[in-house]
Image (cartoon, rainbow, N blue to C red):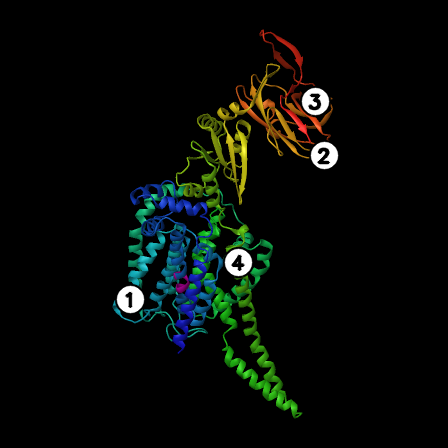
Amino acid sequence: MVKNRIQLAMILLVLAAFALRMHRLDYQALRGDEAFALIFAQQPLGEMLPSLATGEPHPPLYYATLHLWTSLLGQGEFAARFLSVFASVLTVLLIYRLGAALGEVKIGWLAALLGTINPFLIWHGQDVRMYSMLACLGLGSVWLFSSLLSGVAPGREGKSRRKSLWAGYVILSVGVLYVHYFSLFILAVENLTFFCLYLFPGRGEDDTDDFAPAGFVIRPAGVDKGQRHLLRRWCVSQAIIAILYVPWIVYVGKFMLGHTKDWIEPVSLLSFLKRFFAVYSLGTTIPHDRAGLLVWAFILTFLLGCYGLTRLSKEKAVTLGTYLLLPTAGIWLISLFRPIFDERYLIIVAPAYCLFLALGLGVLFQQRCPELCRKAVERLTTLARWQSSGARSALAEGETGSTGWRLAPVVAGGVLLALMLASSGYSLFNYFYVSAYAKSPNWRALVTTLRRQSAPGDLVIHNYPDPALQYYLQDELPLVVLPTDSPLDPVATAEALAKLAAEHQRLWLVPQPSALWDANGFVESWLDRHCDKVHQEAVGALSLSLYLTPSVFLSQMTPLDARFADKVELLGYRLATDVTGPQSGVLTTAPNTALRLTLYWHVLAPLEISYTVFTHLLDANGQLWAQKDNLPVRGSYPTTEWRVGETIVDKYDIVVPPDAPAGQYELEVGLYDVTTGQRLPLVETGSDGERGGREERVLLSDRIVVK
């Protein structure tokens, strides 16, 4: 009956784990790393290997598996993410098996429960990356390792079964090594544990601990033949693993030794511990201030788990302790010299962390709750009878106090478990339903907008190499990533943009801020200065802008022939309003609305002075009613930086004041030196070709009527 209940409980947990990982599986768009994995995995396997030794710092197993998986099920988000779902659900089952082997069934079940609702494992269980597979295969390797040390084959004993265990251990160990390079820590855990127990053997099978009676085969000196046999098999298995893995290390060694992650920063011990407990307990979808409070339930349970570790047999304590602490401490120590710490890289210890939490709860739940409650009720009933008859004894008082003290740990364990479940649920709710914690911008909506508004010949420019845009565009529109590298080369990037502007009539820009790539928005600034932005739209957290190139906006502008001191020429302008468009040179507007003025300058000679552009709204009597004076291109491009031959797009929003009377108005434009107030003179050319007049402004031909 007990066995059936355990099986039923595990079936329910596995179903719950599957349901949580399937929930809204393809609701969010692929993030950049996911899209890269899918695009990369579409390559033929023969072309994939050279890339893994020159550009992509990961082993081939996950990509090869994803290649075969998507070949069968398709390239969609749901199919690709389902591979991680499968690995993540299997991880929950393996957590139970390892917990039951190292502690007892209750510990395994509690650990599996915590793994089922762990936000960090669920997040990666819905991600098209190798991290769920890394956790799964690493955990499987450790579980088979512990089974080999215990000498008990799951299911039935026997020589053939033990051989199968050894073969499975080698396969899983080699497999996890070919998923991620940090899985070398798994091999280090197993070897350190093995030789520690071999050199300093435990108590043997006859010893018991507080959680389970099973022990390990490694015994005190006295069964030397068995020890030598186990040592020989262990050395053979490690040799096979090395033979199968070392050639790959040699193949990629030069590239990996020189590879760095510029976005990973050094981390102090305190910061490391804060991130460790917060992320592995609550994931990344809770505000930092709230996470700092909620995580204390996990920390307290973890500390109790450390105490529970001391109550296990030496063999089990060393296995589980090394599993968690060696990779964690090793990565932090290495990060002191070469920053490599990122929580996802250390996902191999997430199952061990769940086991520690389960041990902590096991310390509190070590009494049988139903039996304890039954005895408590009986004693309280007896005490009530004695009190009703006026009898009270010291023994009764002692038993009542004892019952209360024995109930306290169980109640504390229930409170801690409830807090952990509630905190995890809060994090998962944010992950599934709060857009601020979405793992990716809404690339699908942005690409839909592009498809709807694009025209033949359009080009899309992306200022960050996010593969998600490439994945969703599917070559329907040409896509160019500029800058092509980081740090940005301003000269090369400007030349590339100028070439694209000369070859296309319309350019779409998807600006994506990044501290490591076009951090100052060079691409957007260049387009704002040299192309005419005619449309901008927010699509969720993303932005989309449409620019007309010179070949288009010069043909659509109202032309002018205005030269200022033979240094700069105002080629023309475009004027619009929020109320209505211009008709026959007359623009109708209303008070408290904006006039949208775009000026097109052409640089004839270098300008040594930083001139300010003035745009003035004048009534029929020449009275000034509104103005917008600033450095060109909204103050971002001083005239001293203008280069000869450039065509510059300069935009102004001039607000008609609320008290402006109805009537006809006009705009005047010019340049002046802000330090002296002197305006740059306008040189006019007459019909006979001779220059005459000395104006300091240009009156635009469109007339503005305020109603």
Residue holding disc 3: 675
Pinpoint residue 683: horizontal percent, then vertical percent.
Answer: 62, 13
Circles 1 and 3 in contact, beta carbons < 8 Å:
no
Magenta residues (range) = 90-94
Q: Work out whether residue 291 or residue 353 is closer to the camera in this orientation and state it.
A: 291
Residue holding disc 2: 658
* Residue pictured at 67% horizontal, 15% vertical: 695
Q: Kindly identify the amino acid type of the residue bearing the numbered disc 4.
A: Phe
Q: Work out whether residue 234 or residue 160 is closer to the camera in this orientation and state it.
A: 160
For marks 2 and 3, the one nearer the N-term is 2
> Few, some or many C-alpha atoms within 10 Å of disc 4 (few <14, some 14-19, many ≥20)?
some
Pinpoint residue 255: horizontal percent, then vertical percent.
Answer: 38, 41
Residue holding disc 1: 162
Q: Main secondary structure of the magenta part?
A: helix
- Per the model, the C-alpha gap separating discs 4 and 1 is 44 Å
Look at discs 1 and 3 and give the one toward the viewer. Answer: 3
Left or right of 650 in this view: 126: left
Q: Residue 429, labelled with which disc?
A: 4
Look at discs 2 and 3 and give the one toward the viewer. Answer: 2
